[in-house]
């Protein structure tokens, strides 16, 4: 998965943690609940969504080492702490629905890109060049790409 897609998914997961569940993964203090939430967040991102650890770290403004530590913490706590296990199972259930929606969005984006490529393949080189000069370049300049 490319960086842009990975970061978008991570941001959606972060938003759901904050808006829907009421948990702030950006919290920097070390109280038990925040440590648990960050550990669950990292675990879900990596093991449910298949996201890269460095992209998770970028999203939550943490070092890569802290993300790795959060993942190790999950492995330590999942069988030892009943509160953590309950919290994890509750949050995971909510995120399986989000994962299905995210997969659909990625699939739609890929389909759209393939459709655009097919359309471009059917056009003459002159038409593509004219489109590039009159539409695409102005659009990219206006939107600061």
Image: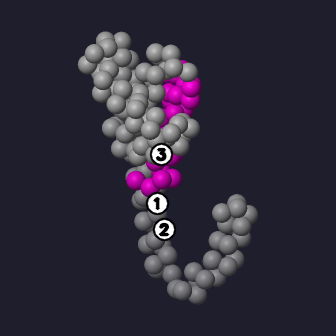
Are circles 2 and 1 on residues that touch, CB within 8 Å?
Answer: yes
Decide which of tag 3 and tag 1 comes sooner along the chain: 3
Taking the spot 56% from the left edge, 29% from the top edge, the residue there is: 26
Give the prevailing secondary structure in the magenta stretch: helix
14 relative to 52 in the view: left or right = right
| The one of 2 and 129 positioned closer to us in this rendering | 2
For the C terminus, give its image quadrant: bottom right
Q: Which residues are magenta?
A: 1-28
Question: Label for residue 55?
Answer: 3
First in sequence: mark 2 or mark 3? 3
Q: Secondary structure at mark 3?
A: helix
* Residue 4 shown left or right of residue 49 in the figure: right
Drawn side of residue 102 relative to residue 143, left or right = left
What secondary structure is marked by label 1?
Answer: helix
**Where is residue 3 shown, x and y percent of the image?**
48, 53
Spatial separation of the CA atoms under disc 2 and disc 1: 6 Å
Is 102 part of what is drawn in magenta? Answer: no
Few, some or many residues within 10 Å of mark 3 (<14, 14–19, 20+): many
Q: Which residue is mark 1?
A: 112
Q: Mark 2 packing: few (<14 Cα in 10 Å), some, or many (20+)? A: few
């Amino acid at each position: 998965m490319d960086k842009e897609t990975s970061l978008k998914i991570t941001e959606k997961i972060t938003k759901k943690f904050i808006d829907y569940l009421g948990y702030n993964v950006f919290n920097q203090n070390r109280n038990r609940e925040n440590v648990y939430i960050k550990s669950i967040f990292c675990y879900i991102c990596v093991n449910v969504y298949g996201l890269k650890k460095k992209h998770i770290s970028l999203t939550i403004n943490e070092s890569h080492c802290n993300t790795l530590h959060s993942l190790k913490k999950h492995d330590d706590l999942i069988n030892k702490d009943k509160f953590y296990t309950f919290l994890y199972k509750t949050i995971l259930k909510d995120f399986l629905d989000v994962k299905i929606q995210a997969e659909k969005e990625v699939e739609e984006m890929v389909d759209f890109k393939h459709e655009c490529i097919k359309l471009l393949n059917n056009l003459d080189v002159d038409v593509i060049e004219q489109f590039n000069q009159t539409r695409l370049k102005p659009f990219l300049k206006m939107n600061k790409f």
